[in-house]
Image: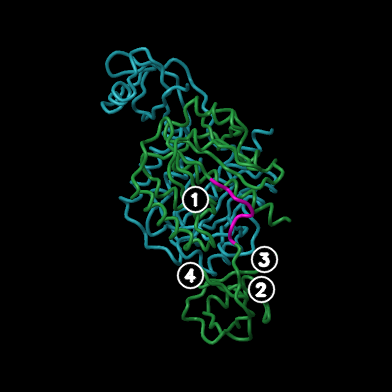
Chain colours: A green, B cyan
Amino acid sequence: MSLQRLAIAPTQLQNEQVSLSASQQHYLRRVLRLQTGDRIILLNGQGQAWLAALQEGATATILEPYILQTELPLDVSLILALPKNGFDDVVRACTELGVSCMMPVISDRSLLKPSPQKLERWRRIATEAAEQSERQTIPPILEPIPFAKSLAHRPDTRSFIAVARGTWPHLLTAVAADSRPSAIQIAIGPEGGWSAAEVEMAIATGFQPVTLGSRILRAITAPIVALSLVTGVLESQQARE
Amino acid sequence: MSLQRLAIAPTQLQNEQVSLSASQQHYLRRVLRLQTGDRIILLNGQGQAWLAALQEGATATILEPYILQTELPLDVSLILALPKNGFDDVVRACTELGVSCMMPVISDRSLLKPSPQKLERWRRIATEAAEQSERQTIPPILEPIPFAKSLAHRPDTRSFIAVARGTWPHLLTAVAADSRPSAIQIAIGPEGGWSAAEVEMAIATGFQPVTLGSRILRAITAPIVALSLVTGVLESQQARE
């Protein structure tokens, strides 16, 4: 059972004492039914956290710094065919969702190599998003390479390729059925999907084709859906361990 | 290769003949390069679809009814605290993901009621997204109301409220553990999250608090994650039935 977390404003903290607002007190005591002496985690929204104990009245006392654990229990990487537009949003949302590494690739139906300025921009977005989502790690975004080159074998890595309009197993089923690998990677196609040749090539390299559901997702929604499913399985399994 | 799908207004259909608008003709003939005699799927946005053949001029002839199966096996509605920005993207992605109904709400930490123009715009986006994602139904977007009013009891509906930084069970675990209800509704907060009073009120009305994972998600990412998890559970269960 993990401890309750509460965001505080930096101004609420002074000399190891935190002054709780009326609504924070109400939430902790009435909604969560915490008692004096109970431990909570306080976050300042800037990556710092502390273990604290509730006191009588409207304060909590800092006990020690607390290392947040918001990273996924294993590496989950995405191989992403570059969409025509909207890759900024993909980078932002995938970083929030805990992605370990993003590998943009040039596919049969995607655009030419983006400019170095774009890559710089995506890395800046990943940095901001990692901070806002209270992660400890900023996920790297690799230099875009052709899809075929991204398919190199990675030891003890479970590899999936999302394919639309197929009759493949659902990603959720496939991940939940796995004994825990060391790492997971998922390849997500561009607008119009992967070409038949690309799917075939990925399967030959050991990728398992999966569906993300019955509806047709845009290229910029699909990575968010895939990550939501994988992180959901990993974190709900973790909570039961 | 699946057939091209096109949404039509019910008024376009008369005596098995569909009158195509100028922009529909352009799209079919110029963009998709379809010819007279080619088959398409027509959708009326209310769950009905037909196989049709393009005719000379501005019409298409209905050949037979067409059964699409891209809707979720049960209704999944979202109660969405209006975010400051980005609700267009929420509407688009949630429609793609199969949402049954979107209920925008005014919460303690969200903005005032949006203009009727905004609501019109969101409904237009939902219509487009339903078409692009090959859905049979266009999800309604209700008039925004205060959060408290949205909490009315709905019979045989399983209700969840997503709460950040808590120790609540994961939405994936909660949904997977359920015997199948008739409907699911999930309340997603604004930037800064629900207020303590709102969470308390929802719990009192029978909503189960859940987490969407360890990281802090933006208000516009959270609904996509929640829907991904719920649709993933429903569709992967369905596939096994």
The amino acid at mark 2 is Arg
In the image, A45 versus A101, the foreground residue is: A101
Q: Distance of mark 3 from mark 1, alpha carbons?
A: 24 Å
Residue mark closest to the camera, 3 vs 1: 1
The kind of secondary structure element at disc 1 is: helix
Could you tell me if the residues under marks 2 and 3 are in contact, i.e. CB atoms within 8 Å? no
Residue mark closest to the camera, 2 vs 1: 1
- Which residue is the site of mark 2? A33
The kind of secondary structure element at disc 2 is: loop
Q: Earlier in the sequence, mark 4 or mark 2?
A: 2
In the image, B20 versus B221, the foreground residue is: B221
- Which residue is the site of mark 1? A94
Discs 3, 1: same chain: yes
Q: Earlier in the sequence, mark 2 or mark 3?
A: 3
- Which residue is the site of mark 3? A2
Q: x%, y% of residue B177?
A: 70, 48
Q: Earlier in the sequence, mark 4 or mark 1?
A: 4
The amino acid at mark 3 is Ser
The amino acid at mark 4 is Gln
The span picked out in magenta is A70-77
The amino acid at mark 1 is Cys
Please report the residue visible at 40 percent of the width from the left and 52 percent of the height from the top: A122
Q: Distance of mark 4 from mark 2, alpha carbons?
A: 27 Å
Instruction: For label 3, count other residues whose C-alpha is less than 10 Å away and answer few (under 14), some (14-19) or many (20+).
Output: few
Q: x%, y% of residue B82?
A: 42, 57
